[in-house]
Amino acid sequence: MTRIIGLTGGIASGKSTVSTMFKEAGIPVIDTDQIAHDLYQKGTTVYDAIVNHFTSDILLTDQSINRKKLGQIIFANKTKRDELNQIVHPEVYHVVDAEIERYKELDEPIVVVDIPLLFETGYDKECDATVVVYTNYENQIERLISRDQIDRDYAAMKIDAQLSLDAKKEQATYVIDNSFSILDTKRDFNHVLEQLEVK
Ligand SMILES: CC(C)(COP(=O)(O)OP(=O)(O)OC[C@H]1O[C@@H](n2cnc3c(N)ncnc32)[C@H](O)[C@@H]1O)[C@@H](O)C(=O)NCCC(=O)NCCS
Ligand SMILES: Nc1ncnc2c1ncn2[C@@H]1O[C@H](COP(=O)(O)OP(=O)(O)OP(=O)(O)O)[C@@H](O)[C@H]1O
């Protein structure tokens, strides 16, 4: 029986940091950001649907999708964000479901699905347990500013595009606090592995 663990957090809370820890523990991770990224390649139905909806204004000179510009559009406008989500999410979850079936055929004991919008899309209902990577709002802002080289207002806009981290924490089976050092986070992570009885 393959157990499905939904991994989420807030933007820049540390999902990828914890996702790497699962991989280092030998646990397969399905990364929905990466799946969405791959679906954006020129020639896919998602690429065509996005260009059709948002026009070629969101293309770079090499005809690839200008992720930065698309981000600026959708993080500032909920209607456009919902429209992009309606184009992308069904295709992402189609790939996720196929990946999970493959792991079930391999009789993999546990699979982690890294989904930024786990609760927003209701995919937590498909999981046997959920893990929320938590940090405080100020940390999220600071990390976004330094990682994405954006200003405070845009960082706040990106954070506000999701359910609050406190709300996600409330719904989580397990919470990993990623507010301090990576060593502290690793301690929380190892505790979650024990709870999941991963040998
Ligand atoms: C807006 C886009 C172009 C920005 O691309 P960029 O390379 O700058 O960021 P990346 O894809 O790595 O996402 C970074 C983080 O942004 C947040 N985020 C991404 N999409 C969304 C969204 N639709 N709503 C809320 N937060 C989002 C997540 O926390 C994600 O981890 C891209 O995120 C996108 O296409 N999003 C729509 C598809 C989606 O919802 N992806 C999330 C996983 S299914
Ligand atoms: N404990 C920590 N202390 C300091 N910086 C951290 C910590 N954890 C993560 N970071 C940094 O914060 C940024 C966000 O981390 P990470 O990419 O893991 O978050 P994420 O939730 O996957 O982000 P996104 O939602 O954008 O995919 C990165 O630049 C990372 O190096």
Image (cartoon, grey):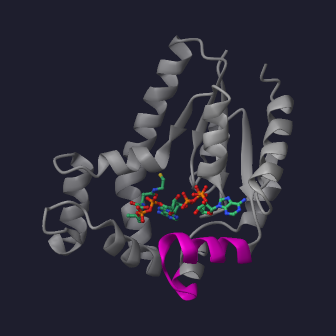
Q: Quadrant of residue 80?
A: bottom left
Q: Main secondary structure of the magenta part?
A: helix
Taking the image as shown, residue 132 lies to the left or right of residue 33, namely right
Q: Position of residue 177 (x, y in %)?
A: 80, 56
Q: Quadrant of ligand 2?
A: bottom right
The residue shown at (35%, 71%) is 68
Between residue 189 and residue 67, name the one nearer to us. Answer: 189
Between residue 144 and residue 124, name the one nearer to us. Answer: 144
Q: Quadrant of the C terminus?
A: top right
Residue 7 vertical placement versus 12 (above, below) = above
The residue shown at (56%, 74%) is 146
Q: Quadrant of the N terminus?
A: top right
For residue 150: magenta? yes
Taking the image as shown, residue 160 lies to the left or right of residue 177, namely left
Q: Quadrant of residue 165?
A: bottom right
Taking the image as shown, residue 192 lies to the left or right of residue 70, namely right
The residue shown at (86%, 38%) is 191
Between residue 79 and residue 199, name the one nearer to us. Answer: 199
Q: Position of residue 102 (x, y in %)?
A: 47, 19
For residue 84: magenta? no
Q: Position of residue 49 (x, y in %)?
A: 23, 57
Question: In the image, which residues are magenta?
Answer: 138-154
Residue 99 vertical placement versus 64 (above, below) = above
Q: How many marks?
A: 0
Q: Position of residue 31 (x, y in %)?
A: 50, 42
The residue shown at (59%, 12%) is 107
